[in-house]
Structures are given as structure tokens and as C-alpha cells.
Amino acid sequence: MASPAPSPATPLRALAALAVLVSAAAAAAACSESDRDALLSIRAALSEARLGVFSTWKGDDCCASWYGVSCDPTNGRVADLSLRGEADDAVMAPEGHPASGVMSGYISDHVCHLDALSSLILADWKQISGPIPSCIATSLPSLRILELPANRLTGEIPRSIGSLSRLAVLNLADNLISGAIPDSISSLASLKHLDLANNQLTGRIPASIGNLATLSRALLGRNRLSGPIPPSVGSLGRLADLDLSENRLSGAIPDSLGSSDGGVLTTLHLGTNRISGRIPAKLLATKGLGIVNLSRNAMEGPIPEVFTGNSYFMVLDLSRNRLTGGVPRSLASATYVGHLDLSHNRLCGTIPTGPPFDHLDAESFASNSCLCGAPLGKCT
Ligand SMILES: *[C@@H]1O[C@H](CO)[C@@H](O)[C@H](O)[C@H]1NC(C)=O
């Protein structure tokens, strides 16, 4: 039997096969060995039994099918580590149920060996404890997203957090983090979302927070922050949501807040603090500001008469302060007032008539000095 004569197509076919191999390699480099070792050390410090998220962490190629791990296909470096304990995730959820997992243990320092990491998300695991490894701030220069909410993390926010020059999202909410907000936070020039709510943070809000030119959400509620609201907050031109409620903040609301032309402030929660002084007129006149809660403070003076056809309030809660004067008549020119609460103040006089006043309950006006007229009793 003669061996088959080499056909002219063969070198071409070989070349094509080689091209496929090369492009496959280019499409997905296998996991870097040191990154895989780091992941295994991270796993060794954590335990999760209910969903079995770590059951897929086997074999050499951590970029291939390890749950929650994704790599830069050009070099096999781990770019994202994202494990969420509460998710609508078809892979991990028992059929027909959203995933709800519990993970305990701590975040290993070995996470700092994943030095190509762009996002680190360990969210809603309820039981992960211990501190945030401080080496994260200095070892992960590509980090854009750091989300570790709803665990039991303790200790302080790493002091040099400001070194993470690409960080856009910092979410450490719902933990047991204590200490002060580091001043260096104001160096996070790309920061858009800052959520530190529901921790045990103390001290003042850094005055330099006004440097965060791209900041859109600042959620610092339910901590133990004290001192004034820094006036520089008013210079955050992209700030849409500000929540400082349930702290120990004192002093007046800065005149600069919300007043900036072209500002985008839509939600302001300052309830349950020790804020005093008057309500800045420009604040309530801010176009687009739709949710304002100044309840449970020590604010005094009149409610400014600044409402216009541009006013559109889903919520305007000024209850439990020391406000004096009457109910502003200009509220009648607001396009919409959904929930209005002026109760527990020192207001006096006749409640105006017409919308929005004719759809409000007596509760909106209860416990004032001498308000009268519908929905309260007749004026005498
Ligand atoms: C305003 O904030 C306080 C907490 O500070 C809260 O108890 C209250 O329900 C809020 N009001 C509205 C209308 O959401």
C-alpha cells in the first residue's frame, strides 16, 4: 500500500490548525499559577456550606470554571472575584429560590497577591468577620470596585485607602467597622459610590470630601459620626444622593448644599442627628430635589417660602424639630407634594387650603403650637 501522496492542501490545513490553536491561546490564557495559589489561600480562610460556591474551585485553570472568578484572557490574571450571598443566580440558587448563603471565616491577606484585581466583591455573606486586609489599599492598584457589604467585618477602614486611584465604588455598608473615615478618602479621584452606612464609624466627616468631584452617592447613615456637615459637600457637583441620617452630626446645614446651579441633588436624608440652625432657603428651592428628610433634629426658624412650580416632593419630612412660623403658602404652587410631615414642631396659624393641603391627613400637622384649619380643627 502506497502511503498517500502529500496533497497540496496539507501545509495549508496544518497552518489553519495552528492558527486555531494560537487564537484559542490568545482568547483565554490559563490561570496564572500565583493567582491560583492566592485563591486557594483565600478559600482556605473562608467556609461556605449551603450553596457550595467553592465546589467549583478545583483543577488547575482558575480562569476556566471557578465560580465567581474571571480573568483577563490575554494574560490569565484574575481580574474579578465576585461572590454574593444574596443573588438571583441560576447556578447557585436551589431551584425556584434566590440564593441565600452564609459564609464565615475571614478575608485572607493573600487577596493582596491578586494584584491585577479590578473588582473584589464579597457581599451579603453575613458571617465573614475580621478586618479588611490593609494591604488591599497598597497592593491592588487596578481596583475599581470594592464591595464587602453585609458581613461582620471589624477594625478600621485601611488608612491608605486613598491610594486606590481607580476606585469607583467603595461599599462597606452593614458591617461593624469602627474608627474614623480616613482623610485619604478624598484622594479617590474616580469615586462615584461611597456606601459606609450602618457601621460604627466615629469622628468627623473629612472636610476634604469636597474634593471627590465625581461622587454621586454618599451614604454614611447609621453610624456615630459627629461634628458638622462639611460645607465642601456643597461643591460636589455630581452628588445625587446624600444620606447622613442617624448619626450625631451637629451645627447648621451648610448654605452651599443643593444650591449650586446645575447640581443634581435629588435625595437628602439628614434625619435623627443634632442639626440646628435654620433651613437654608436655597436648599428647598433646589430644582430636582424630591426627597428631603430633616426629621428629628433641632432645626429652628421658619420653613422658607420658596416653593414654586419647580417643586416636586415625593417626601418632605421636617417633623420633630423646633420650626416656628406658619405653613408656607407657596407650597400650594408646588407641582407635587406626596408625603408631607410638619408634625412635632412649633408652627402656628391657619393651614392653607387647596392642593396639596386638601389630600393631607391631620398627622402631617399634629403636635404644633397653634396650627388650625382643615385637616385640623377650625380656627377660632
Ligand atoms: C425620616 O427619617 C427618620 C430617621 O431619621 C425616619 O424614622 C422617618 O421614617 C423618615 N421619614 C420618612 C417619611 O421616610
Image (cartoon, grey):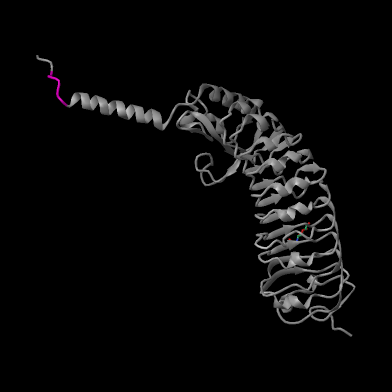
Question: Is residue 76 shown above or below 265?
Answer: above
Question: Is residue 210 shown above or below 361?
Answer: above
List the single residue furthest toward the top.
1
Q: Is residue 244 visible?
A: no
Question: Is residue 334 shown above or below 122?
Answer: below
Using the image as rendered, state which of residue 168 and residue 376 is in the foreground: 168
Q: Is residue 247 left or right of residue 126?
A: right
Q: Is residue 245 left or right of residue 37?
A: right
Q: Is residue 46 left or right of residue 18?
A: right
> What x and y, as percent, mark residue 197?
73, 47
Using the image as rendered, state which of residue 47 and residue 320 is in the foreground: 320
For the C terminus, give its image quadrant: bottom right
List the single residue furthest toward the bottom.
380
Image-quadrant location for residue 291: bottom right
Q: Quadrant of ligand 1?
A: bottom right
Q: Is residue 126 visible?
A: yes
Question: Is residue 255 shown above or below 229?
Answer: below
Q: Residue at x 65, y 47 (%)?
A: 193
> What x and y, as percent, mark residue 347?
86, 72
> What x and y, as percent, mark residue 216?
65, 52
The stretch in magenta equals: 4-8
Q: Is residue 264 magenta?
A: no
For the N terminus, give its image quadrant: top left
